[in-house]
Image (cartoon, grey):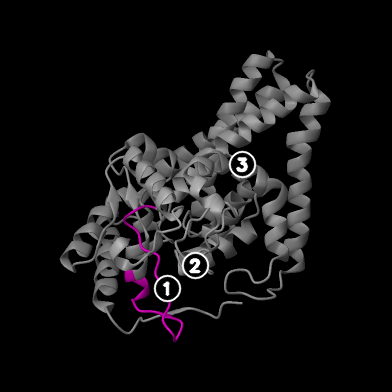
Amino acid sequence: MPSLVTFNNKIDKEFSKAVKKRVNAYFEEKGISKHANAAMVFKTIAILSLYWVPFVLILTAGFSVEIMWLLCFIMGIGMAGIGFSVTHDALHGAYSANPTVNNILGTMFDLVGANGYIWKITHNIIHHTYTNIHGHDEDLEVAEFIRLSPHTEYKPVHKFQHFLAFPAYSFATIFWVFVKDYWYFFKSPLGPYENKNHPTKEWVKLIITKIVVYTLTIVLPLTLLDITWWQYLIGFFSVHLTAGLILGIIFQLAHVVETTTHPLPNEQNMIENHWVIHEMLTTNNFARKNKLLCWYVGGLNFQIEHHLFPKVCSIHYPAISPIVEETAKEFGIPYNCHETFLEAVASHYRTLKKFGDKDFTWSPATA
């Protein structure tokens, strides 16, 4: 098991203090909450409707198979949007100052097939603390045949990963619904945690919510709809392959691109940077001017701001982004950003290709 990695937070404190002070001042001067506003509430309703309205229509409206298939694609877009724009904020405690509101909205994560409790461990705690650190960041462990860290043991199959990765991302939510959550509940070590005990209530919630999801998405369609089993599978896979591809791509553009680093701890198991500097070096923004994308992905294209201020609702990231960027520039700290979505995708593709080269050796100079 990897021992606990620490950060050299005794150095370079000035940037951390300055950026926090300036962002806090923004909210104080504007007299606004760091949590959801009316625009976020409207978006929440719209995104939830994008998934649940097509689902209800499929079960009740008696549409043709072709129309139901189209509605399945819309559900897939809605499913990814729920993860991006609703539950991500809620599970971080950023949506509302009221924990009950966050818990209720966070339950939407469970009702589309994932598990909010395990997500808080693997994402909120492990990924956000140990970003891009091999052996600790669970987000780097997508599949054995995909090498997202230059420190992962090389395998011959990795030379094909720039072709394999994107189709593999499509299966993300299917794997999540049927395998991933169970696997993480039993996995040890889990990031830096060994033999982590999960509360009984979380085991119960896992089983109950999975049964609910299987009933809603498998039992009810097969019982209520006049379709064959293979037509059902086409619809089911259409939902999940759409959601999985969208989720997989968006999340990878935040950390596995050419501009981000993959540091290793020193002999004392310490990252030789302040944690805030580490987050700046390992995180990437993209397409900040694309308003539709910003709306849909819930500010996840502002990953720098999200990692520095995870308790701030994503609806505010476009506004505080210039503050963070200017402060970083002032302190001589990189602010990784791709201007467009396609530039970021191309950079991720090149990174996959680079990490798939057996002769590639990573160093800070080649990051």
Q: Position of residue 295 (x, y in %)?
A: 39, 39
Quote the CA–CA distance across marks 2 and 3. 23 Å
Q: Are marks 2 and 3 in contact (CB under 8 Å)?
A: no
Dominant secondary-structure state across the stretch colored magenta:
loop
Q: Quadrant of the N terminus?
A: bottom right
Q: Position of residue 88 (x, y in %)?
A: 51, 52
- Provide the residue designation for mark 1: 264
Residue 260 lies within the magenta run: yes
- Provide the residue designation for mark 3: 171
Inspect the image, locate mark 3, and give the three-letter code of the amino acid beneath it.
Answer: Phe
Q: Label 2: state its secondary structure.
A: loop
Marker disc for residue 33: none
Q: Residue at x 30, y 59 (%)?
A: 27
Inspect the image, locate mark 2, and give the three-letter code of the amino acid beneath it.
Answer: His
Q: Residue at x 19, y 59 (%)?
A: 326
Q: Residue at x 76, y 44 (%)?
A: 212
The stretch in magenta equals 257-277
Quote the CA–CA distance across marks 1 and 3. 30 Å
Quote the CA–CA distance across marks 1 and 2. 7 Å
Q: Residue at x 66, y 47 (%)?
A: 175
Viewed as shown, does residue 40 lie left or right of 66?
A: left
Viewed as shown, does residue 237 lie left or right of 282?
A: right
Q: Earlier in the sequence, mark 1 or mark 2?
A: 2
Q: Dot 3, crowdedness within 10 Å: few (<14), some or many (≥20)?
A: some
Q: Please state which of the two labelled residues, at mark 2 or mark 3, is closer to the viewer.
A: 2
Marker disc for residue 134: 2
Task: Kindly indicate the quadrant of the structure image that contains residue 272.
Answer: bottom left
Q: Are marks 1 and 2 in contact (CB under 8 Å)?
A: yes
Inspect the image, locate mark 1, and give the three-letter code of the amino acid beneath it.
Answer: Leu
Q: Quadrant of the C terminus?
A: bottom left
